[in-house]
Amino acid sequence: MNVILFSDSEEMKERFLPLQRSRAVDFSLLPCSSLKRGLKEAPREAFVYVDVSGYGRESKERILKYLKVYGKRRYGIVDPEGSVCDIGTLFLDGASDYVGRSFDGQITPRRVRGALALRAQMLEDAGSHKKTLVEDGYILSGSDWRRMRSGQEYTFCLMYIELEDKRQLMRTLSDDLIGAADNSFRSYVERTVTQNNGKVWMWNDFEGIVLFPFDGRRCEAVLMCFGLMLSRTVYSVENPHFNTLLSFSICLHLGNTVYRRIGDTGTIVSDSVNTVFNLGRKFGEPGNFYVTGEVLAYAPKGMEGCFLPVGRFEGFEVLRMRLPV
Amino acid sequence: MRVNSRLTNLAIRALAESMDVHTMSHLARRLIQNYDLFERTGFPTNISIPNKDAARQIVYDLTSRELFLDLIVLLIRMRDYYFRGRKYRIPYLREILIEINNSGLVYDKESNQFFEDPSIAKTKNWGVLRENGEYIFTFFRLDIVGSSQLVRQNSPEVVHQTYKDLRRIVQNAVEKRNGRIWNWEGDGVLIAFYFSGRNNNAVLSAMEIIHELYIYNLIKSELNVPLRVRIAVDSGPCKFRHNIEDAESETLKRLANIEAQSTKPDCVTISSNVCMYIDHLITNRLERTGEQENPPYYYYYRLKWEI
């Protein structure tokens, strides 16, 4: 077992004495200043401890970021001053051990083995999760739009939204007012989805398709649509174009489609886009919010109880949001 | 608001070039009772005061009594509506309004008042209400249900974070509708709305808070029980005091009473004063407590779910 400690503190040397004495451990102590070079030269299987008290506040943040990138390796943080506020994030970023201020014992080979096992388990879990997603046919688009290229296929969370009273509105309002009302509704949808990383992709007469990137972890769009359904009265009062309680229906589905820029979508053929359109137009009852089982699996925890199963559509389980009455 | 020399000069020219001394004098008396222009300028009563001298004196006097904005509001009303039987063309008014905008105030046409531009500053008095002046406000008061129990049963970090989140939710719902948080007193908050649409804005903010808290409890709360609040909305006169504890108002007492005695957890109770003025789309969502023949009766809003 290869363990490297980056520290300038004599006291730390004492705490790692059991590792130095152990025959099973190849232990080396290096100064904090040589961290980057030391990491590059360290064997891949080495477990690295970094004593962050050897750095100033700014360089400490830089080092933690650097270690996050380095996260495929195995490392632990030594923090004798207790200066790291969010210890949980260290673990989320790839650390597998933390030696804090209140720790007054010594680091033993057993502890390092435990940290190694934890890291192995974390990597295995992440790997199997990715594998399942790939088996499901998902092409993860990441959490934002930066890596998205026009003409490439990705998995998106697809949202269909339609204003229910549009036929009534089109009959009763003048052309100018219809235009103003459509713009008002679209800009409300646009404002809301943009805050949640979404893009209005197609839009025509009070209905549209919105895309949300999907990173295989969470689908926040469910929460956003839930909020939209709750705030219908508030929206209707604050938008005087309509002078009536607006009712819209929403459908969310997870599926693949070739991504093209807005306005260049006329020739797209996609099963998922068809499914979400048909779900909204043929299956959905007015004023409701539907999700497919695929989406709900990635909804924020705690939301499952807000939906009721209502059947299947094109092979997908469909659930409807319990509405406020 | 600090009135700079450019603004003063523009106001003097606007007055001098749009009306005669007699009308100016009337205008000044609208704002300062028994205002005597001859006495202020030192001109004998048998000599007519030149327009510019009269305008300068009036602008200086009103500015020194912090009535400059009221003068501009009067000028806007003279232009848009009627003053002593006719409309007036007021030159330089556009420039005056631009100058006032640049100093961080915007004009609200419906209430005919200036208030601070919320993107620049958010003060308790909207930058314009005077200490001890009496105004009609719509208030809402929010109280956390069982706050001492929450504090006892949860770790200080969790309680601290929860209160911080609640503060963010309330602030977000209220400030985008031009409401002002007047007082946080640990487990309760008093919020004031003034200017046009204040009743709608207060009720909509309260409804939004109830919705946001529902979502918060669903997915984010770390408390061992849901975070619940009671909200009461009422309107009425109240003297504005920067230190809100000095404000003695029947409206505030009544509001506290409604909140404590007539509001259930997770509910917004709305007084009939407010209910009269809110949009019908909101009133359709309300239920009534008590008998109309047997006041006081209130309306309330709560989230009810289909089973």
Image: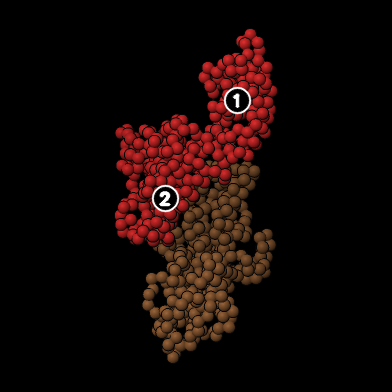
At x 50%, y 82%, the residue is: A29
For label 2, the residue is: B210
At x 65%, y 15%, the residue is: B49
Give chain A's shade: brown
Query: Which chain is red in the picture?
Result: B
Q: Give B291 or A13, whichever is nearer the viewer.
A: A13
Q: Which mark is residue A215?
A: none
For label 1, the residue is: B60
**Residue B294 in sight here:** yes
Image color mode: by chain
Asked where in the image residue A173 lies, by quadrant, the reply is top right
Position of residue B94 measured from the top left corner of the image (x, y, whole percent): 66, 33
Position of residue B272 measured from the top left corner of the image (x, y, whole percent): 39, 36
- The three-letter amino acid code for the residue at tag 2 is Ile
At x 64%, y 36%, the residue is: B99
Q: Nearer the viewer, mark 2 or mark 1?
A: 1
Q: Are marks 2 and 1 in contact (CB under 8 Å)?
A: no
Q: Chain of mark 2?
A: B
**Residue A324 in sight here:** no
Label 1 neighbour load within 10 Å: few <14, some 14-19, many 20+ = some
Instruction: Please state if B150 lies on the left or on the right of A286 as rendered.
Output: left
- The three-letter amino acid code for the residue at tag 1 is Tyr
At x 53%, y 80%, the residue is: A30
Of all residues shown, which one is farthest toward the front?
Answer: A10
Position of residue A153 measured from the top left corner of the image (x, y, whole percent): 62, 71
The image shows residue B54, relative to residue B267, as above or below, that is above
The image shows residue B244, relative to residue A230, as above or below, that is above
